[in-house]
Amino acid sequence: MVPGELTAIVGINGIGKSTLLRTLGNAQPLLSGQLIIKKKPLEAYAPLELSSEISMVLTEPIASKNLSVLELVALGRQPYTNWLGKLTDIDKNKISEAFEALELSDLKDKKCFELSDGQLQRAMIARALAQDTDIILLDEPTTHLDLYHKVQILKLLRTIAHTTKKTVVFTTHEIEMAIQLCDKMLLLDGKSNHFGQPCELITQKAFESLFPSDTVVFDPKTGSFRIKK
Ligand SMILES: Nc1ncnc2c1ncn2[C@@H]1O[C@H](COP(=O)(O)OP(=O)(O)OP(=O)(O)O)[C@@H](O)[C@H]1O
């Protein structure tokens, strides 16, 4: 996973996608092995240092939906503000850049409980963007969204990765969309765990082993799955 790329982690339910993502972001302890972030072991980072390197958008509901969208996005600047939480001009610039990138300006003063699922997801991503970390991790950012809004979120993530040169990694069940929109994919199957560009993975027949072949089969020509009847 490198700067400027959008990477999807996919695999069947329970294979460990969220566990891997949350471990990468230090939201849960390592089960085994070692994690190196920017040539430095994860455990060598102080919490504040890590929060200026990695931002996360998790599936847990936010603590207070009573916050306005502006207040939620401003929380992204917490690692940088002093103990009074006063926002500097740099903080304000980062917040307004995030609002622009996620097309949220019209919703600035709305309360989070007033937002649709898609709007709230965009606000959560804006908070992560305002945090201005080199790495952004998102756990199932398109869950509960309709097809149009799933595509909208994934396209936004792709634009963020490409234009800001951040490393953007997310877990998803939207494999066909990820094939079309991601630069790289990690296919967790508990054995080979293929990683690479979607077209390379198609050539390697990596998608064929993601699901039991008596139920769904992968069509490499269309990059989609077909139900076996
Ligand atoms: N490397 C691992 N070693 C041992 N247990 C693991 C490992 N990775 C995940 N698990 C365990 O497997 C279970 C499912 O993991 P997780 O929720 O990460 O899967 P998932 O792929 O995100 O599933 P879903 O698609 O249903 O959300 C959890 O109880 C987790 O603790």
Image (cartoon, rainbow, N blue to C red):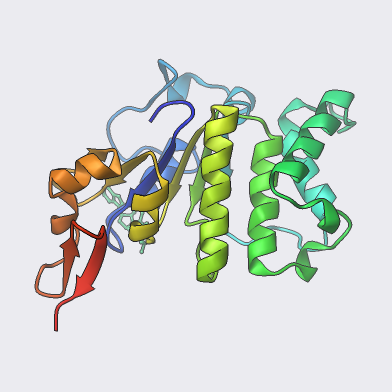
Considering only vertical position in the picture, is 90 above or below 57? above
The image shows a total of numbered marks equal to: 0
Asked if residue 98 lies left or right of residue 168, the reply is right
Quadrant containing the C terminus is bottom left
At horizontal 72% and vertical 39% (from top left) the residue drawn is: 76
Residue, far front: 221
Quadrant containing the N terminus is top left
Rendered location of residue 210, percent (x, y): 19, 58
Considering only vertical position in the picture, is 107 above or below 22? below
Rendered location of residue 8, percent (x, y): 39, 46
Rendered location of residue 211, percent (x, y): 18, 64
Considering only vertical position in the picture, is 219 above or below 79? below
At horizontal 25% and vertical 60% (from top left) the residue drawn is: 222
Asked if residue 111 lies left or right of residue 165, the reply is right
Residue, far top: 39
Residue 68 seen anywhere in this rendered image of the structure: no
At horizontal 32% and vertical 41% (from top left) the residue drawn is: 31
Residue 147 seen anywhere in this rendered image of the structure: yes
Residue, far left: 214
Taking depth in this image into account, of 229 and 211 the one nearest to the observer is: 229
Asked if residue 163 lies left or right of residue 20, the reply is right
Ligand number 1: quarter of image: bottom left
Rendered location of residue 58, percent (x, y): 55, 52
Considering only vertical position in the picture, is 172 above or below 81? below
